[in-house]
Amino acid sequence: MTPDRADVLIVGGGLAGSLVALAVAARDASRRITVVDSGAPQEGQSDSHTWSFHDTDLSPDAARWIAPAVAHRWPGQEVRFPSYARRLRAGYASLTSQSLRAAVEALPMVTRLPGRATAIGAAGAQLHDGSRIDAPCVIDATGRVPRGYLTLGWQKFVGVERQTARPHGRALPIIMDATVDQRDGYRFVYTLPFAPDRILIEDTRYSDGPALDHASFEAGIEDYARAQGWDGTEARREHGVLPIAMAFDAEAFWADAAAGPVPVGMRAGLFHPVTGYSLPLAARAADIIAAAMLESPVSTASVMAAMRRFALETADRQRFLRLLSRMLFRGAAPPARRKVLERFYRLPEPLIERFYAGDLTRADQARILLGRPPIPIRDALPCLREAPLLEDLRRKRAT
Amino acid sequence: MARIAFLMPPYRSHAAVHGALAARLAGRGHEVIFVGPPALQPHAQREGAGFQPFRGPAQAGRIGGGPAGFARLLRDTARATRAHALDGPAALRAARADIAVVDEMEPGGSLAADAAGVPRVTLAASLPLRRDPGMPPPYVGWDWREGEDGVRRAEGAWRVSDWLMTAQRRALAEGCRLHGLPVRDRPSDWIGAEGSVAQWIAALDFPRPQPVGPVVGPIRRPVAAAADPPLFDGAPYVFASLGTIAGGRLRLFTVIARAARLAGVNVAVAHCGGLSPAQAAALTAIWPGRIDVRAFFDQLPAIRGAAAVVTHGGLNTVLDAAGFGVPMVALPLGNDQNGIAARLRRAGAAITLSPRRVTPDSLAAAIASVTTDPRWRAALDPARAEIAAAGGADAAADAVEGALR
Ligand SMILES: Cc1cc2nc3c(=O)[nH]c(=O)nc-3n(C[C@H](O)[C@H](O)[C@H](O)COP(=O)(O)OP(=O)(O)OC[C@H]3O[C@@H](n4cnc5c(N)ncnc54)[C@H](O)[C@@H]3O)c2cc1C
């Protein structure tokens, strides 16, 4: 099979692009898919990834087709705060760059090529070596956040996977250990025990600015490891600067994207506004695309229409999550952010699960806001409206 | 051969007991590891045990300092227990412990062991926590009261105690929920299935319907065979110590030195590092040549050779003195020392004085009485006999090995 005869061209074989390939292949094994990936991380992002999700984030369908890409699973997770710790029942799982890539490469009708696109259009992509790949359906999964349409805060982290000299003793992930000292906004440590003597330790901070001071994060990781006697060697490292959305002009973004390739993943602003995670939405988007492709003939336009509908609905449903982000970043002083999160984690588990999945009900929203407001009402009021931020964005885009 | 973990509050008095037991078990071929927050590390080092850390306080809760100090101590206690509840289980797994020896005073250690599925033996290094009828909390200095009245009084005291320990109880309850254990939030709920291996002997205790567990008496390292030259060249002396926690009480040491001079007897003062060199020198100057001030003596020989012991009434010092039949004057400073003093009074085994009201005169009179009246020494006979038969570190090691099978 040669790439220029593909039905679908996916530019960017990171998380979102790979999930589209997996979902499409699961629905219709005869689709010819070409994935082009530059292999070079974008500025500020690392090429080594651990992508994690809660079992409750995915539909049963998605859980099935993502399974071959899963590298680790755990039967639950924990959160820890200064005066509250809790085990959460939802199972947790991780994909790694390797496991995801291997799952995609195992698909018979998928070709994964190295190559950097210099221009991507609705009908194909121009590669850096001058060659061109055309396809009836082109998907842009290059991961770059459309910053002009978003008002952002940042979740920054550095993770070190450590081979410990002796067993570390941890059995479950701790997705937020906020008992550590607070610096640089809201800080917590995230740990994933991959094996009895392997553990990923991530120092994470919710900060106002995207600058990543590696040395400070390394020191935080080292302190945490040393306190538990986890001597050992570094096996791998990853880092990230994830966007937290306070405002998103989705209408404008999709209007401007109409004539191009179908954006997915971060490229489409499809991430959780409070956690910066994109896997649950990428999986849903992949399902939507796979469903749209069942109608032949497949075209960029038909997939675009389905994605646009899904993305606008999503952006609308995320209104409340963006409000929470505004409260966290604009309403709460950095030291108060931890309290907001601690309170949140005292809520019932089904609500927490729906929060991660981005599926909060109206009752959930009321409960988060009214039961015990995350921040004092006085501080919350100025955050309530998204419109002023959208206005700012519009002005900036115009100039 | 087993890997044996030891969990305890990071106080020297507790660590010394665990250390002696650990040394005995190590002598039998086991591997011994102290498991705790950073504050425990120096103790592990001193006691020659391995160390498995977990995240938690770097310093022991400070004892003393009035009501504010007490509130702080309660908070620190709860914090240490919470650290055990959160990170103790992983640390026990990391240490690959086959069994845990857990001090009754750190119930978080027992919680950690249960959460990690590691069998455990509890150790009462201080007064046992078991709530027998009429038994007041250890740090209450009440004299024993027989009958219903005493039972009711003790229950009331425990209610207050439970209320004071609310923060620690919360930490325990939270830890239980976190690890899916049935909620037990009082320290006494965590006493081991076979009771606790206890240092404190029945002869000096308030009456209990049955023993709290294997009562083994003082758990000590063997006394060095080649002893130092005898203190004061073999002349009679009083040994005085206020313990490792409250070593810095210059005023009391001064009263003790003056009292010794009034009573005309040499005195060896162990200040446990609580006095500066200048303060120690000032103390010596009270009666040059007759006062020997040091941070630490080789304590067992020093007590064995003494005519009497002036003590804060810490459990270890009291048991050591009782074991050698050396009469005591007790000046309880806090903690369980009030409870110990009340038990000594009931057994007629010591003169107890209030450290706040004691004067050189009253202390001199007490020293003169215990050193000259043979009835004080005789009153310790039952205690001495019980300790001699109880087995100490060996019996404790047997109990731990018994739980391994
Ligand atoms: C280290 C890290 C850990 C994360 N962990 C999680 C997590 O646990 N759970 C979660 O839900 N989210 C997580 N995220 C957030 C988010 O899910 C990721 O950022 C995710 O990778 C975004 O997916 P994407 O496909 O949109 O972008 P990416 O995964 O970044 O993929 C973009 C791909 O496109 C390629 N590319 C870019 N430009 C070109 C070009 N011009 N031509 C060809 N190829 C190109 C890149 O090489 C890259 O492989 C994490 C992010 C990071 C950085």
Image: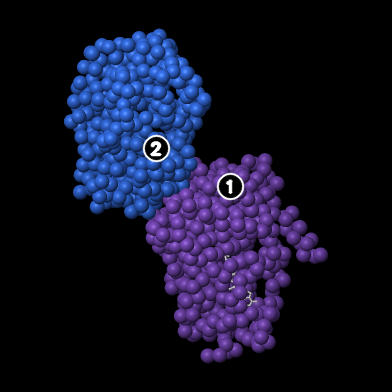
Chain colours: A purple, B blue
Residue under label 1, please give it: A182
Q: Nearer the viewer, residue B230 or B151?
A: B230
Residue marked by disc 2: B9
Pointer 2 and pointer 1: residues touching (CB < 8 Å)? no
Q: Is residue A171 visible?
A: no
The x, y position of residue A209, in whole percent, is 68, 56
Using the rendered view, name the quadrant where residue A164 is placed: bottom left
Which residue extends farthest right?
A: A399
Q: Residues within 10 Å of mark 1 (few under 14, many from 20)?
A: some
Q: Is residue B344 left or right of residue B248?
A: left
Q: Secondary structure at mark 1?
A: loop
Rendered-image quadrant of the C terminus of chain A:
bottom right
> Depth-wise, is mark 2 or mark 1 nearer the camera?
2
Residue type, mark 2 in image: Pro
Mark 1 and ligand 1: say if the CB distance to the nearest ligand atom is below 8 Å: no
Coordinates of residue B366 in the picture (x, y in percent): 34, 12
